[in-house]
Image (spheres, coloured by chain):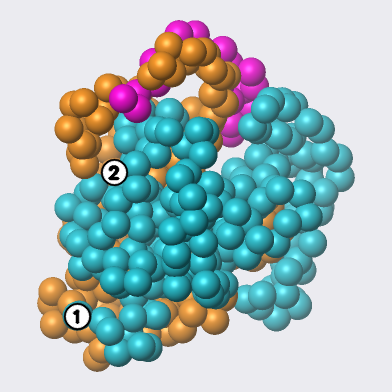
Chain colours: A cyan, B orange
Amino acid sequence: MSSKGRGNPRPSFIMKFTETQRTTTQVFKGKLLDVRLDTVELPDGRTATREYILHQGAVVMIPVLPDGKIVLVKQFRYPIGRVMIEFPAGKLDPGEDYLTTAERELKEEIGYRPGRMTLLGELEPCVGYSNERMGIVLAEDLTADSVPGDEDEWIEVMPVTFDEALSLVWDGSITDSKTVAGLFWYSKVLNQSGLAGK
Amino acid sequence: MSSKGRGNPRPSFIMKFTETQRTTTQVFKGKLLDVRLDTVELPDGRTATREYILHQGAVVMIPVLPDGKIVLVKQFRYPIGRVMIEFPAGKLDPGEDYLTTAERELKEEIGYRPGRMTLLGELEPCVGYSNERMGIVLAEDLTADSVPGDEDEWIEVMPVTFDEALSLVWDGSITDSKTVAGLFWYSKVLNQSGLAGK
């Protein structure tokens, strides 16, 4: 719960806003979710409760094939109740950094090994009820490495051009936030390399 | 858990991927979170469990002031542990549609009444562990309506140009996914109106 120093405003502003943890209780622990109920002290001294998911962090990958296409995946997302079109993503193992996770997940999910990886930025998907933080990793110079593992038999790989991906956003076929935000970051990469609109 | 018909692939693909709910259990219910543990039948007939947040839906607003600036807000987000810069957002009340929520939240959070609202698209912020769906509402022709309510004394309004908002994304000051994705949608609005880059 510490302040991270990125994008923080002046100290007096922080003082005015900060909530201080007093107690924390694990109210549910499943295979996936760790749910916490904290009591906090508000800036005016009153007490309140806060409920949230404690998350280990994740990474979303923007895999670029030698022909310039980017790799999306289709998979069924049970909470949403339908097949989603997304950039490949995965959770960090304990102590793992973004690039290590990205390399592992690229191999497992889509069967490629990246020649070059760049951490573009970070996202926080659910600031109201999860502490999840996600690295956005651009993965280039991909080479086919292996057939994706058994666990991913229900993932379908979907290479598209950037313009095709944009159309899927604007027509409502891509609604996954990390994928929409990742495409925005990738548009910056294309603009800087002079490739936008090609 | 029904299929929504937007962006869905062919029926055989859906058959192959779909997980069917067998049981659902509420494992935690707080003031904010409703946490579910379901058993599901996988496409191959095996059984698995799924854990997720049951969410009532939300809306994120892109408020455009008469001078062309867009309105961001700063607020402390306890799960993240720091002050975040975001578009204003709020949860749907039961039975409420996106535009009704947007009008209410604009008044409560930033003290403006919109003259015109447009639903640009939808986002799903946390497809791995929440069924949250969020409307993206462009709110134009804003007029000052009231001082924001007491509950928002810890929200600071921050009008910026689109280019300033972009800089805040690229320098890591904006990491909230709905805000990054919302800015991408707004770049499309600006491109269509011929205002991009002005």
Q: Residue at x 64, y 22 (%)?
A: B28
Horizontally, is B50 left or right of A163 in the view?
right
Q: Classify B115 as above or below B134.
A: below
Confirm or deny contact between disc 1 and disc 2 (CB under 8 A): no
Of A23 and B8, the residue lying toward us: B8
Q: Position of residue B56 (x, y in %)?
A: 42, 32
Of B95 and B81, the residue lying toward us: B81
Q: Classify A187 as above or below B75.
A: below
Which image quarter: residue A180? bottom left
Rendered image: mark on residue A167: none
* Rendered-image quadrant of the N terminus of chain A: bottom right
Q: Exactly how many numbered labels are in the figure? A: 2
Q: Which residue is mark 1?
A: A198
- Circle 2 SS class: helix
Amino acid type assigned to the residue bearing label 1 in the image: Lys
Distance of label 1 from label 2 (alpha carbons): 36 Å
Amino acid type assigned to the residue bearing label 2 in the image: Tyr
Q: Position of residue A80 (x, y in %)?
A: 39, 32
Horizontally, is A93 left or right of B147 in the view?
right
Tell us which disc is closer to us: 1 or 2.
Answer: 1
Residue placed farthest to the top in the image?
B22
Q: Residues within 10 Å of mark 1 (few under 14, many from 20)?
A: few
Using the image, name the chain to which the residue with label 1 belongs: A
Q: Which residue is mark 2?
A: B98
Q: Is residue A25 visible?
A: yes
Segment tinted magenta in the rendering? B16-36
Q: Residue at x 48, y 75 (%)?
A: B169
